[in-house]
């Protein structure tokens, strides 16, 4: 499982890459693997205000429909329109294909996100629970 060291993670299996006041949001390798073949992505509208924990997008696969939650409060400044015609890009490389960019309103919220090490431990625990 791929867990890049330059990202922050949520317990809902989203990642964000912080670049100044902008956060690039996507789903993790763990998420895309468990979803299976992704066939549709409902993207957020630009200029939409969102709160931490709010559903921002929907990812549909052959196995399930899953909401993507915002790890930060802010405004959606753009979405990745490439995913509308090629949702499978999230399977091919979930870290190279973000879902949206969010202008961060409250940088302190970043402190509640997981480091790559903490996220790796969290995923290992979830894998263990699935085996039971």
Image (spheres, helix red, strand yellow):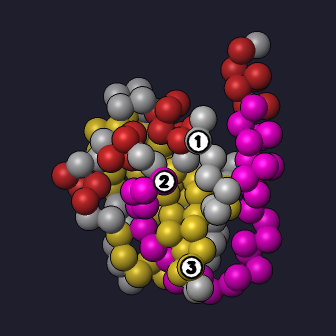
Residue 95 locus on image (x, y percent): 48, 53
Residue pointed to by mark 2: 95
Disc ID at residue 37:
none
Give the residue at x 50% y 69%: 24
- 1 to 102, vertically: above or below: above
Residue pointed to by mark 1: 2
Counting residues from the start of the chain, the first of labels 2 and 1 encountered is 1
Counting residues from the start of the chain, the first of labels 3 and 2 encountered is 3
Give the residue at x 47% y 43%: 66
Residue 53 appears in the rendering? no
Which image quarter is the N terminus in? top right
Residue toward you, 93 or 130: 93
Residue 127 locus on image (x, y percent): 70, 26
Residue 40 locus on image (x, y percent): 29, 45
Stretch in magenta: 95-124
Residue pointed to by mark 3: 19
Give the secondary structure at mark 1: loop
Q: Left of 112 or right of it: where is 95?
A: left
Q: Left of 39 or right of it: where is 65?
A: right
Which image quarter is the C terminus in? top right
Give the secondary structure at mark 3: strand
Q: Left of 53 or right of it: where is 25?
A: left
Query: What crowding class fits label 2: few (fewer than 14 Cα within 10 Å), some (14-19), or many (20 or more)?
Result: many
Give how far apart the Cα atoms at labels 2 and 1 are. 9 Å
Residue 96: quadrant of the picture:
bottom left
Give the residue at x 67% y 56%: 5
- Callout 2 touching callout 1 (CB < 8 Å): yes
Q: Left of 128 or right of it: where is 47?
A: left
Residue toward you, 77 or 88: 88
106 drawn magenta: yes
């Amino acid at each position: 499982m791929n867990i890049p060291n330059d990202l922050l993670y949520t317990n809902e299996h989203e990642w964000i890459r912080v670049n100044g006041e902008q956060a690039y949001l996507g789903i993790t390798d763990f998420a895309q693997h468990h979803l299976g073949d992704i066939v549709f992505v409902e993207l957020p509208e630009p200029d939409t205000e969102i709160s931490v924990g709010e559903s921002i997008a929907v990812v549909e696969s052959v196995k399930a429909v899953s909401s993507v939650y915002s790890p930060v409060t802010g405004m959606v400044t753009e979405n990745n329109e490439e995913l509308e015609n090629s949702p499978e890009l999230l399977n091919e490389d979930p870290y190279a294909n973000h879902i949206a960019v969010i202008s961060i309103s409250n940088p302190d919220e970043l402190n509640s996100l997981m480091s790559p090490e903490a996220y790796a431990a969290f995923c290992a625990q979830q894998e263990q629970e699935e085996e039971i």
